Image (cartoon, rainbow, N blue to C red):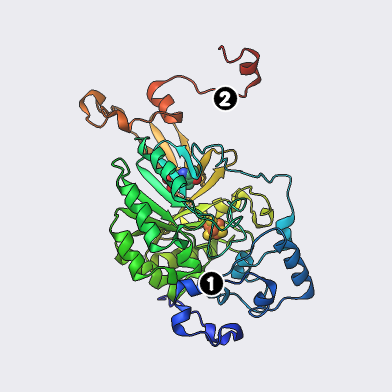
Amino acid sequence: MKRKFAHVNYKDIPLFKDVTEEEWNDWKWQMRNAIRDIPTLEKVLELNEEERDHLSQTLDQFKMAITPYYAALMDKENNDCPIRKMAVPQLKELYVDPSDLNDPLNEDGDSPVSGLTHRYPDRVLLMVTRECSMYCRHCTRRRIVGETDTSSGKDQLQRDFDYIRNTPEIRDVIISGGDPLVLSDERIDYILTELRKIDHVEIIRIGSRMPVVLPQRITDHLCEVIKKHHPVYVNTHFNHPKEVTIEAQKACEKLANAGVQLGNQSVLLKGINDCPNIMKGLVHDLLMIRVKPYYIYQCDLSEGISHFRTTISKGIEIIENLRGHTSGMAVPTFVVDAPGGGGKIPVMPDYLISQTEKRVVLRNYEGMLSSYTQPSDYHSHDPQKCEYCQNEFLWAKDGVAKLLNEGGTLKPQELRREQRTNGKH
Ligand SMILES: *Cc1c(COP(=O)(O)O)cnc(C)c1O
Ligand code: SF4
């Protein structure tokens, strides 16, 4: 079956029936006309008394913005629609679950300069704006995103660039937000140009949900700008096959034709995509529009999104249903972004069943067990004779890899016995 994606048919929606094709395809028109209040929302979908009341309570605390394009994807009558659940606030957002954390990923704690998170050795997250074209109800960064619709000023950006310039380990910069593509092409060009002036920055990634919620943003001009600064990667955020429209396809193809590798980072969300078959449909659609499924995130512990959370086992079930059953290219890595700032931890079914010195027993996706007989005379190469092993820049300087390479121990500071002796062990 060759997939055919749907066009978003906005002319059927009374609120948009007089909108010209030109306006509709103008991303700035879409941003200006984002749905931000209840009366406008009621012109595109039916709300019952209770929903209206809940919505107004929620809007006292959290912002809503839905691009007309994304609104046109919503089911007007059915409030179980996955698109609607990602866009329309629910009263549950006001509920703070005992497991909720204000900054679950400790992004503030790992922030050496304002607007920048440096957690991993060689890459940083650079937040250039707090604004988005649409506010996803499940947003991890909801504590900052949309709080004020502001972008980092030149001073702050300058300090962030200085940090990157003065930290030679950084070879990968992830431009994030908010949604960096709310910025003008000129500003994006400026940021990319400044980053490209730093010798040790090898790759640049842009994290944006625009291809999903406002594909009109991906203009020829934007692609021309990005193209000047390769290698640039774009990671986007499709969560459901209904989001894969002809418009989204065009946007992704444009970027791909400009030489951009596209990846997708989904969030596992209750009642939206917590189903192996929905996920399989999504990853197949993504490959058709030249996007490689990269991550599926376990929904994290941010405040007010507990109604979206699934168990971790649901993610394992999804991978079990993908790996081997479909193209390896279609299988993302399922990760839990560890609370407290531990970073992304991959989780998957266990494929290694048992082992001795001689053999390893593995299972495949069908449940077939195979034994792999290991070479008895295996020795790794001599690091002294390997130019890469002599390159200190490539050494793992932290973590379990360091223990394997150099021996030693890695002790949690928080152990009571460490505290009794002030760490004098
Ligand atoms: C996700 C993330 C990255 C990038 O992780 P990759 O696994 O390299 O995609 C970098 N920094 C922070 C703080 C992150 O949350
Ligand atoms: S686009 Fe990203 S940052 Fe913006 S609201 Fe959605 S998830 Fe949050």
Q: Is residue 338 above or below residue 37?
A: above
Label 1: state its secondary structure.
helix
Q: Residue at x 41, y 71 (%)?
A: 249
Taking the view exactly as shown, the residue that stands out farthest to the front is 155
Cβ of mark 1 under 8 Å from ligand 2: the answer is no
Q: Residue at x 61, y 72 (%)?
A: 35
Type of amino acid under label 1: Arg
Q: Position of residue 111 (x, y in %)?
A: 51, 39
**Seen in the image, is 257 located left or right of residue 69?**
left
**Mark 2, residue position:** 412
Disc 2, SS: loop
Please state if 183 lies on the left or on the right of 94 as rendered: left
Instruction: Name the residue beneath numbered marker 1.
Output: 32
Q: Position of residue 335 (x, y in %)?
A: 51, 47
- Quick check: 32 above or below 400? below
- Answer with left or right where residue 376 lies relative to residue 424: left
Write the residue at 32% across / 62% down. 225
Residue 395 tag number:
none
Q: Are marks 1 and 2 in contact (CB under 8 Å)?
A: no
Q: Residues within 10 Å of mark 2 (few under 14, many from 20)?
A: few
Quadrant that contains the N terminus: bottom left
Q: Nearer the viewer, residue 247 or 242?
A: 247
Give whichever of discs 1 and 2 has the lower sequence position. 1
- Quarter of the rendering containing residue 46: bottom right
